[in-house]
């Protein structure tokens, strides 16, 4: 723990953002770091009053988020809207989603993408980065983007931060140089915090009450299997849990989901079972085309038969959990892409599941309707 003066940090950030005409877009995941950023900027808004730029809390709903975390975030945003209105703080909450053609199950079932791996981690760009880039591109004036990135999270991230940090701003600003976001300034107000500092800030700052620190701490405890009292900073604070998409097959084991199920979140078990099945299903060579779409030798995309099987499992999951997982518009796009593959001789030559009779029931205009 670095004994950071959080009130001094509020004053520092307030000086940096005072009178900015462009809004500040806060990337919000509902986790401890982005929650700490919201608390800091909320305090800045109280300090600056009319001189504070508009705050836009932006949550990227990948549509395959851990459903417990997703519900927690959306409940937090709902409370935050009301609290900001009562406090007369110019704060908006926005939920953004991937474009239909880039959504997870359209990529998997419609295009046949294998579920993500460390060597083919297409999901982060498609369902997290691109939606946020599209959101920024649609703004009337480029906003300042506030994120909860910190030193010490990984060696690769530390190198990137050091490369782009503007030391003149005392580590508060960095310049983002990545594709599609050149010229976007990033505000990183907790860049030099360690995990204990983050929890101390969350506990010490009273507002906004919409950030329920007790509930947040419980999620981290339940997701990691161990966590001391959040005010006891002599011990290791909650930090091990890593929440993300319930479909994530990049990691070998989804330990956070395992711990949450052990902690009583029984509603996660069906999602966890399908995720585990997807990881095994991806690795079976019989489920893959012999060539990639660029013509190179495989393993290529999922075969049409494999995609139909995935679709069937997701529909069964929908019935089990009583929640729509694939949107109607996504089903329409999936059907279009499947039809395109079925009429493409080049694709047909690489898909062994098309060598016999084509009996692949897919969706028609309604959910659950079948056609051959």
Image: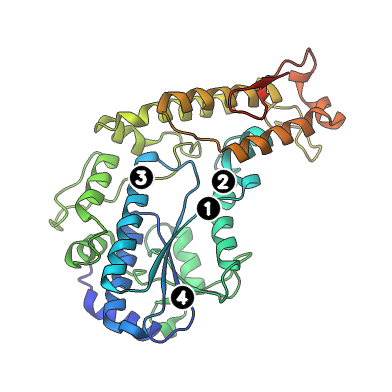
Residue 102, position as x, y percentages in the image:
63, 47
Proximity of marks 2 and 4: CB atoms separated by less than 8 Å: no
Please tell me which residue lies in front, 263 or 42. 42
Earlier residue among tags 1 and 2: 2
Quadrant, the C terminus:
top right
Between the C-alphas of marks 2 and 4, the distance is: 28 Å
Note whether 148 is above or below 325 in the view shown. below
**Residue bearing the label numbered 1:** 128
Camera-near label (2 vs 3) is 3
Can residue 225 be seen from the camera position used here?
A: yes
Note whether 285 is above or below 333 in the view shown. above
Between the C-alphas of marks 3 and 4, the distance is: 26 Å
Between the C-alphas of marks 4 and 1, the distance is: 21 Å
**Callout 3: 10 Å neighbours few (<14), some, many (20+)?**
few
**Callout 4: 10 Å neighbours few (<14), some, many (20+)?**
many
Camera-near label (2 vs 4) is 4
């Amino acid at each position: 723990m670095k004994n950071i003066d959080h009130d001094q940090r509020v004053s520092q950030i307030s000086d940096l953002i005072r009178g900015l005409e462009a809004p500040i877009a806060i990337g919000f995941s509902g986790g401890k770091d982005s929650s700490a950023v919201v608390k800091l900027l909320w305090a800045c808004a109280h300090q600056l009053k009319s001189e504070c730029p508009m705050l836009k809390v932006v949550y990227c709903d990948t549509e395959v988020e851990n459903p417990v975390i997703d519900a927690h975030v959306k409940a937090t945003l709902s409370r935050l809207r009301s609290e900001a209105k009562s406090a007369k703080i110019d704060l908006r909450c926005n939920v953004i989603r991937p474009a239909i053609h880039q959504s997870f199950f359209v990529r998997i079932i419609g295009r046949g993408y294998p579920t993500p791996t460390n060597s083919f981690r297409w999901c982060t760009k498609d369902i997290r980065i691109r939606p946020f880039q599209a959101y920024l591109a649609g703004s009337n004036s480029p906003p300042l983007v506030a994120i909860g990135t910190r030193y010490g999270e990984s060696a690769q991230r530390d190198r990137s931060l050091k490369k782009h940090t503007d030391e003149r701003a005392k580590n508060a600003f960095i310049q983002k140089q990545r594709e599609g976001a050149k010229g976007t300034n990033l505000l990183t107000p907790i860049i030099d915090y360690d995990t204990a500092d983050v929890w101390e800030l969350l506990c010490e700052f009273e507002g906004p009450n919409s950030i329920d620190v007790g509930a947040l701490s419980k999620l981290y405890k339940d997701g990691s299997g161990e966590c001391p009292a959040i005010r006891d900073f002599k011990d290791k604070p909650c930090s091990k849990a890593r929440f993300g998409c319930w479909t994530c097959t990049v990691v070998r084991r989804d330990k956070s989901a395992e711990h949450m199920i052990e902690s009583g979140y029984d509603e996660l078990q069906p999602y966890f079972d399908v995720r585990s099945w997807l990881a095994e299903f991806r690795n079976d060579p019989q489920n893959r085309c012999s060539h990639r779409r660029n013509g190179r030798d495989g393993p290529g995309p999922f075969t049409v038969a494999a995609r139909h099987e995935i679709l069937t499992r997701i529909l069964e999951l929908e019935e089990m959990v009583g929640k729509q997982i694939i949107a109607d518009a996504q089903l329409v796009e999936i059907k279009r892409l499947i039809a395109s593959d079925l009429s493409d001789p080049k694709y047909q030559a690489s898909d062994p599941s098309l060598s016999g009779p084509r009996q692949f029931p897919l969706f028609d205009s309604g959910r659950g309707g079948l056609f051959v």
